[in-house]
Image: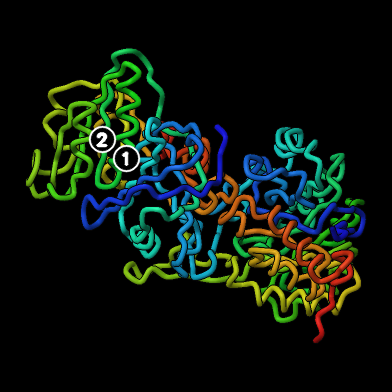
Amino acid sequence: MADLRTKIAGFTMKNPVMTASGTFGYGVEFADFVNLEDIGGIIVKGTTLHPREGNDYPRMVETASGMLNCVGLQNKGVDYFCEHIYPEIKDIKTNMIVNVSGSSPEDYAECAAKVNGLEGIPAIELNISCPNVKQGGMAFGVTTEGAAAVVKAVREVYDKTLIVKLSPNVTSIADIALAVQDAGADAVSLINTLMGMVIDIEKRKPVLSIATGGMSGPAVKPVAVRCVWQVAKAVSIPVVGLGGIMNAHDAIEFFLAGASAIEIGTANFIDPAVTVKVVQGINNWLDAHGCQSVSEIVGQVNA
Amino acid sequence: MKKYVKDLKVKAVEFPHEWYVLLKLTDEEPLPESVPGQFVEVKVEGSPRTFLRRPISINYVDREKNELWLLIKKVGEGTHKLAELKVGDTLNVVFPLGNGFSPVQKQGEKVLLVGGGVGVAPLLDYGKFLKERGAEPVFLLGARSKSDLLEQELFNAIAPVYVTTEDGSEGEKGFVTQHTVLNKEKFDRISVCGPKPMMVSVARYAKATNTPCEVSLENMMACGLGACLCCVEKTVKGNVCVCKEGPVFDINDLTWKV
């Protein structure tokens, strides 16, 4: 049994497997399939200062080895989360992490400040990379100045671990990572979805209601591994890797590229019990390769 | 109701028509509890361009034989691949999902079950459920022509069946909403599953006659568990997941123009 314990800045997980925001609900939706406490961390659905209805249907389209979505951050707002959802999830014995989004540095900060007071939420993941909302979201994540402004505003009001989720839809993701590190981020997670488009050729119209959407699934994995590798070389803070991870083999790739932990997203839709299988598979691979801990393989790709 | 992910065994594969396949699945253990109108998400193996699971409504559950039936229309690559399954193969299934049709409201209530095309599938299970619990189901089933009317003998064994076909080759010619039974009889409530235009016209009939009506939707889904928020339908309560809050909705909760 290898040592799977993983420390991300201010909190420690029993293993390096987390769930990606927007793919695992609030965890409870999957409780019939997995023991939630066996997952290292659960990152819940994107939360904003005010309630959001999200985009119109259709919000999802399948593609070869993946899917596109344009959900658009549908959620009932941070106050509803604090009053109604948090009491339901606070006693789950894992790291419950809230994904926070916004449309200005001020409302990111106001939302983060409300989560700051919640006991048992050791971290937030700041979403500066959602491709599906008109204002905010990815707009902040595609420039070093925009990214730094949001992180600075949140850092002033949030004292626990601050993870910043980065967009791959940029020229240099390493530059953005450095900017958020300098602005006070404790860790980065990457990648958010890649912007894509699918056209219905009979209707001569985009399939998705807002034309474009964020692509996820195994099709994007090589892009994600490349981004993790570039960012891990550039920054000194921990990197959390995600993008198309379907099994333990994929997870090991991310560790070797430089990720200290990983998130599983779209794979939850294919196998609702995939998270715990990946935990087991990582352990088996480490044992088979004579590794004592997961941390010893982080960044160990010979490139 | 507890949900499961299971490898079910294919016990029989039938082809009621060139467009459809009927899979009868079984398991070594008793099949989980489910209610009519719920659905399953099946994993399609060996179809490289089929990435997501396919949501399929439960056609029938035979508790004595421990069988779960899926009546599937061959639409795309995924459903065509499902039609290639052989007896003895396994099919990975996440189920039971969604809310299902309403329970019996009162003894002897007359419930009209309207189905079109493959939308007849969940009505077989529901009709039997209602009959066994003291309600009086009546089926009104539509198809393009006689040859693609599905499971007629099974529906007939449960309750009266009225039929429309678009070409008039069986029953009355036209659409379900044109059937004369709608003028002759009065129903306590209506449940509908079929193409959206059909469900909208049945909903109009229901409004006009002041009859409670529920419809079963089939928006494109990913997770099936209410986690991804992809399959949403606009309702009076805002956007809600068809996979979790539905697939069955009271028409008064929807924002359809009826």
How crowded pointer 2 is (Cα within 10 Å; few <14, some 14-19, many 20+) is rated as many
Percent from the top left, x then y, of residue A283? 79, 61
The quarter of the image holding the C terminus of chain B is top left
Find the distance from the CA under tag 2 to the CA under tag 1.
Answer: 6 Å
The quarter of the image holding the N terminus of chain B is top right
Percent from the top left, x then y, of residue B245? 51, 37
Residue B35's place in the image compared with A116, above or below, is above
Side (left or right) of B199 relative to A191: left
Q: Chain of mark 2?
A: B
To which quarter of the image does residue B179 belong? top left
Mark 1 or mark 2, which is nearer the start of the sequence?
2
Q: Amino acid at mark 2?
A: Val
Visible residue check, residue A140: no
Q: Residue at x 88, y 51 (%)?
A: A158
**Residue labelled with disc 2:** B114
How crowded pointer 1 is (Cα within 10 Å; few <14, some 14-19, many 20+) is rated as many
Q: Residue at x 79, y 46 (%)?
A: A96
Q: Secondary structure at mark 2?
A: strand
Q: Residue at x 43, y 64 (%)?
A: A207
Percent from the top left, x then y, of residue A144? 79, 74
Residue A192's place in the image compared with A83, above or below, is below
Q: Residue furthest top?
A: B107
**Residue labelled with disc 1:** B193
Please report contact status of discs 2 and 1: CB closer than 8 Å, yes or no: yes
Residue B140 - label = none
Q: Residue at x 54, y 64 (%)?
A: A68
Percent from the top left, x then y, of residue A285? 76, 67
